[in-house]
Image (tube, rainbow, N blue to C red):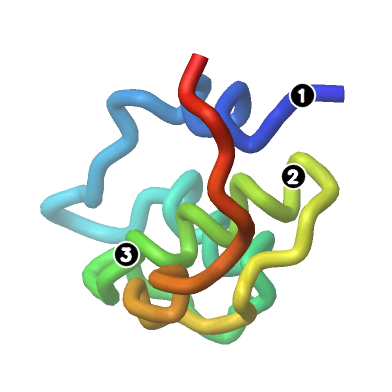
Amino acid sequence: MKTAYDHARAEIGVTEWAEGTNPRVKSYYHDAGAAGVSDDAVPWCAAFVGAMLSRAGHRGTGSLAARSYLNWGAPVALA
């Protein structure tokens, strides 16, 4: 199974579009549990984290506020 990190690396280079909404960004909202958001102009950093966690089989905070991840999870040793 892919880790959240693996999923995130596969998304490198995704950006908002000047015109319209990038469907990749829209999928982050959906996968993070906020399918009602349909515009990539809405800040999507927490949606991205939540989506990558969800894709890896983990539960995020369920919030679109980046600060909701301040105390999420447990510390791990860096390799």
- Indicate the position of residue 46 as horizontal and vertical percent values: 42, 66
User: What is the spatial separation of the Cα atoms under label 1 and label 3, in whole angstroms?
Assistant: 25 Å
Residue drawn at 61 percent across, 76 percent down: 61
Image quarter for residue 14? top left
Residue drawn at 68 percent across, 60 percent down: 31
- Indicate the position of residue 79 as horizontal and vertical percent values: 51, 14
The label on residue 2 is 1
The label on residue 21 is none
Dot placed on the residue nearer the N-terminal end, 1 or 3: 1
User: What is the spatial separation of the Cα atoms under label 2 and label 1, in whole angstroms?
Assistant: 8 Å
- Tell me if residue 12 comes above or below residue 65 in the rendering: above
- Tell me if residue 6 comes above or below residue 20 in the rendering: above
Residues at marks 1 and 3 touching, judged by CB atoms closer than 8 Å: no
Amino acid type at circle 3 is Asp
Q: Is residue 58 left or right of residue 11?
A: right
Dot placed on the residue nearer the N-terminal end, 3 or 2: 3
Amino acid type at circle 1 is Lys
Q: Which sits in the foreground, 36 or 78?
A: 78
- Indicate the position of residue 78 as horizontal and vertical percent values: 47, 24
Q: Which residue is mark 3?
A: 40
Q: Which residue is mark 2?
A: 55
The tally of labels here is 3
User: What is the spatial separation of the Cα atoms under label 3 and label 2, in whole angstroms?
Assistant: 19 Å
- Tell me if residue 58 comes above or below residue 30 in the rendering: above
- Tell me if residue 57 comes above or below residue 45 in the rendering: above
Amino acid type at circle 2 is Arg
Q: Is residue 37 left or right of residue 16?
A: right
Residue drawn at 48 percent across, 50 percent down: 23
Dot placed on the residue nearer the N-terminal end, 2 or 1: 1
Residues at marks 2 and 1 touching, judged by CB atoms closer than 8 Å: yes
For marks 1 and 3, give the one nearer the viewer: 1
For marks 3 and 2, give the one nearer the viewer: 2
